[in-house]
Image (spheres, grey):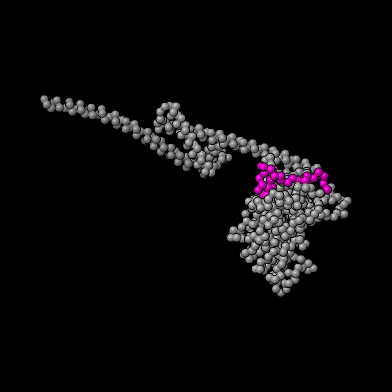
Amino acid sequence: MILSNRYPRILTSAFILVLLVLPLQIADAAKKRPHNDSRAKNSRRSTSRSEKSKKLSARDRRSNRRERLSARNSRRGGKSRVRLSRREMRRERIQSAREQAALLKALERRRGRPLSKRERAAELRRMGSKRRREILEARRRAEAARRAAIARQRALDKALRDEVQGMILRDNTSGEDPQVRQVAINALGNHAGTVVVMDPMTGKVYSIVNQEWGVRRGFKPCSTIKLVTGVAGLSENIIPPAELTLASDRPRMDLTSALARSDNGYFERVGTGIGFDKMIHYAREMGLGEKTGANVPFEFAGRLPEMSPNFTLRRMFSYADGFEVTALQLGNLVSAMANGGKLLVPQVTTPQDASKFRPKVRRKLDIDGNVLQRMIPGMIGAVNYGSGRKAYDPLQTVAGKTGTCNGGNGSWVGLFTSYAPLANPKLAVVVITRGTDAHHHLPAAVAGRIYRDLHDRFGTPTNLQIASTPDDEEKEVGTEEGDDMIADQNGTATEDTDESNAAAAPAPTHKLVPESAPSNVKRVMNPINTPAQKTDTQKAVTPAKSSVPPPTQPDDRPRRTQDPQE
């Protein structure tokens, strides 16, 4: 009886236990099933991908990858999206985090309770998606604005170039040299600009391409005003007469390097010592702010700065704020530097008066000839290794100065004023361009092509001989290539010596006697002269001790290289 009653109780307990355990097992199976299903799906997907990749060729895989990248770029705004710097990205992240925190707090205030983690994550995802859409839309608007600006600039450039071509066709070519004019027109091409080619020793104007811009319209001279700043600084002893050209392993910024690299800070510091009144005085002395007296109608006299409350004085010495010059005025200025300080009257000769042409000297500059000579090494450096390298001519030495700046009303101006050859100047070339054609030193490239194309007619030989001179006869030092030959040969030198070695010419005005020639200079560069024109230094050298190379020997002199800077 006892046994019969025990078994039903055991069965009942077992049944109850099964009912309690079975739901728990079903729940565990339900939880594990999605994970197993996803794993199975992933395995099947990877298997199918591997099979497809095996079937695809390398070309197809590259094509598919390009399509995926193209689709991703199109979703993100294309390749034209703006790339931010690290600082900008960090600032953007901080700003975005602050905005998100402010929005979450505002949402909690509206609901009257704190958000849960799930609600907070959903809200952050929504705000992130909205932020990405806003960024994408902003990028699209910026890209559309950029393309519209490019289209407007191209339309303006085309209109400006068409206008210039019409002006060139209306030029009065009477008395101009046909060969020089054709070379200048070919060099300028379809660019918006003007070209003046003249003889720096006589003032004879060979050609003015686009006479409306070259004679009757003023332009901001930009960095070419540094020629006036340098002359004023040397004349007023603001620039020391003996600057060390090499203070360490890296060349120090002296007058020569500042001219070659067009260093704005250097000339602004010099201009601070010059002052407004002195700068205006030297600008007038070198022919700016007044008509040149050329026999062309309606010549523009230019403009000089006027002191006003909003006038930034330091920019006048480097960026030429307040100045306006014509291409003919710049040609006359650089001609005065080439011929030793004579401000000439430019003249366009007519065929009838060609045989009666005589140079007209307007005035002799009240500037020491040594001051003009000390400017020449920097002008040579600008062409050889500086900002005007596009004007370099391997057959002759070109001295010049570049200029690029915003000329007002959003229009850029590019200039290049120069003369060549150094030893016997025969051409002074000035190029001024506007708009997009003012960038990338295009004026220097135009002038360089003119020098190269006219070298057969106006060029002079540039072979030099090396002469060994005794220490007691070193009274004149001259070189045709630049400002640092002695420094490279001896290791140490002063700028006064280096810059005095910049120009050699047959006229006495192109020879500089330095204030104190260093005693350790043993080798100097002199131009080849005829036997009747030999200097005392060359006479002192006996043939047995001279190390003169033959005229056909290649020029392997060392040259300093520097990074150009406008």
In the rendered image, residue 41, in percent from the top left (x then y), is placed at 41, 35
Quadrant placement of the N terminus? top left
In the rendered image, residue 114, in percent from the top left (x then y), is placed at 40, 30
> Residue 274, can we see it?
yes
User: Is 298 contained in the magenta span?
Assistant: yes
Q: Count numbered badges in the picture.
A: 0
Kindly identify the residue that appears in the image at 72 percent across and 64 percent down.
513
Kindly identify the residue that appears in the image at 68 percent across and 57 percent down.
237
The overriding secondary structure of the stretch rendered in magenta is loop
Left or right, 32 with respect to 557, comes to: left
Residue 49, relative to residue 344: is it above or below? above
User: Is 464 contained in the magenta span?
Assistant: no
Kindly identify the residue that appears in the image at 63 percent across and 37 percent down.
147
Residue 224, relative to residue 554: is it above or below? above
Numbered range of the magenta stretch:
294-321
Residue 400, relative to residue 15: is it above or below? below
Query: Which residue is more in the foreground, 530 or 30?
Result: 530
The residue furthest right is 352
Kindly identify the residue that appears in the image at 74 percent across and 56 percent down.
367
Left or right, 433 with respect to 39, comes to: right
> Residue 422, can we see it?
no
Query: Which residue is more in the foreground, 150 or 29?
Result: 150
In the rendered image, residue 389, in percent from the top left (x then y), is placed at 67, 53
In the rendered image, residue 408, in percent from the top left (x then y), is placed at 69, 42
